[in-house]
């Protein structure tokens, strides 16, 4: 029998297959949007920007914020590509991750552009089942979560948007989210639903990394506003505010 490849060891100390990055090309903290076109949006807040790589859904740029080297890498949509991004970024030197994404609210009164800080994810995905026992929790790093909430609250003072925190859900199938499923999540008090954080949190815990998430509300699935009739300007403002909060948290903790 030929030798079976151990993927846990393959590719270490090398340019990574999916993200196209080699050791030494990134910093120790990475902001993770889903959309590769939002990586340049993060770069707008940075100085001395370098366009590092763009392969498949994974685009990476680096730059400095208040003297700290920041990496921004897009994960693509869903847990499989997010897990790949985290695994490969960790192999090239990233030790802390902050997801900055879009998310649909599941409780009434949350508006497009509001900021949502995750305290943990309901694992309704297939990827983390390959990593851990079904009862293993998908929870972010405590210090990063607190720093994100504090930074977001400070940024929101006197502004026309809210900052909320709570448990979110990570789903695999965007168009399989039925009204019955949305109602069930609402009844559980789940704050919002997105598609990446459970993989981010589980992989980070297992690999002894740190992770957190702050999202901009894109729509409200119980107030009747979908992605198809949302307010683009409010969402763009939400993305920008979530990015600044994540950057301030990264600097405050010296990630």
Image (cartoon, rainbow, N blue to C red):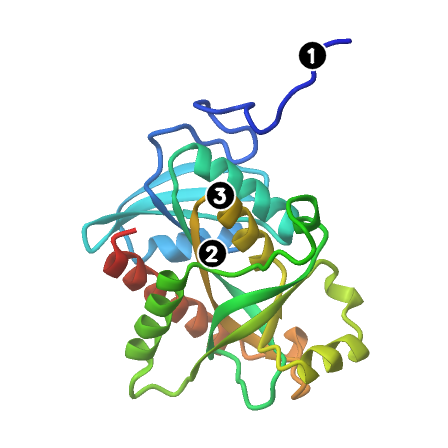
Secondary structure beneath dot 2 equals helix
Res 189 visible = yes
Near mark 2 (Cα within 10 A), the count class, few <14, some 14-19 or many ≥20, is: some
Q: Position of residue 70 (x, y in %)?
A: 32, 48
Q: Which residue is mark 1?
A: 3
Residue pictured at 56% horizontal, 72% vertical: 167
Mark 1–mark 2 CB contact (< 8 Å)? no
Q: Is residue 113 left or right of residue 177?
A: left
Residue pictured at 50% horizontal, 36% vertical: 88
Secondary structure beneath dot 3 equals strand
Q: Is residue 169 left or right of residue 12?
A: right
Q: Which residue is mark 2?
A: 38
User: Tag on residue 59?
Assistant: 3
Count every numbered label the image shows and give the total.
3
Whichever of labels 2 and 3 marks the residue nearer the N terminus, that label is 2
Mark 3–mark 1 CB contact (< 8 Å)? no
Residue pictured at 59% horizontal, 52% vertical: 199
Q: Position of residue 5 (x, y in %)?
A: 65, 20
């Amino acid at each position: 029998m030929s030798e079976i490849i151990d993927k846990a060891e393959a590719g270490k100390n090398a340019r990574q297959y999916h993200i196209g990055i080699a050791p030494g090309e990134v910093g120790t903290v990475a902001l993770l949007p889903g959309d590769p076109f939002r990586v340049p949006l993060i770069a707008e807040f940075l100085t001395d920007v370098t366009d590092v790589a763009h392969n498949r859904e994974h685009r990476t740029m680096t730059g400095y914020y208040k003297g700290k080297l920041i990496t921004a890498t897009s994960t693509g949509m869903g847990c499989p590509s997010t897990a790949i991004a985290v695994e490969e970024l960790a192999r090239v030197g990233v030790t802390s991750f902050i997801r900055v994404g879009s998310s649909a609210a599941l409780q009434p009164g949350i508006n497009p552009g509001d900021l949502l800080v995750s305290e943990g994810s309901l694992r309704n995905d297939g990827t983390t089942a390959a990593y851990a026992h079904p009862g293993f929790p998908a929870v972010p790093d405590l210090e990063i979560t607190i720093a994100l909430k504090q930074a977001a609250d400070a940024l929101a003072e006197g502004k026309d948007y809210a900052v909320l925190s709570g448990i979110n859900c990570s789903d695999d199938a965007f168009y399989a989210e039925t009204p019955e499923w949305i109602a069930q999540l609402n009844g559980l008090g789940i704050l919002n639903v997105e598609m990446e954080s459970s993989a981010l949190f589980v992989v980070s815990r297992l690999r002894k990394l740190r992770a957190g998430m702050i999202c901009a509300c894109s729509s409200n699935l119980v107030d009747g506003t979908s992605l198809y009739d949302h307010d683009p300007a409010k969402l763009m403002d939400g993305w920008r505010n979530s990015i600044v909060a994540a950057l301030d948290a990264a600097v405050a903790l010296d990630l």
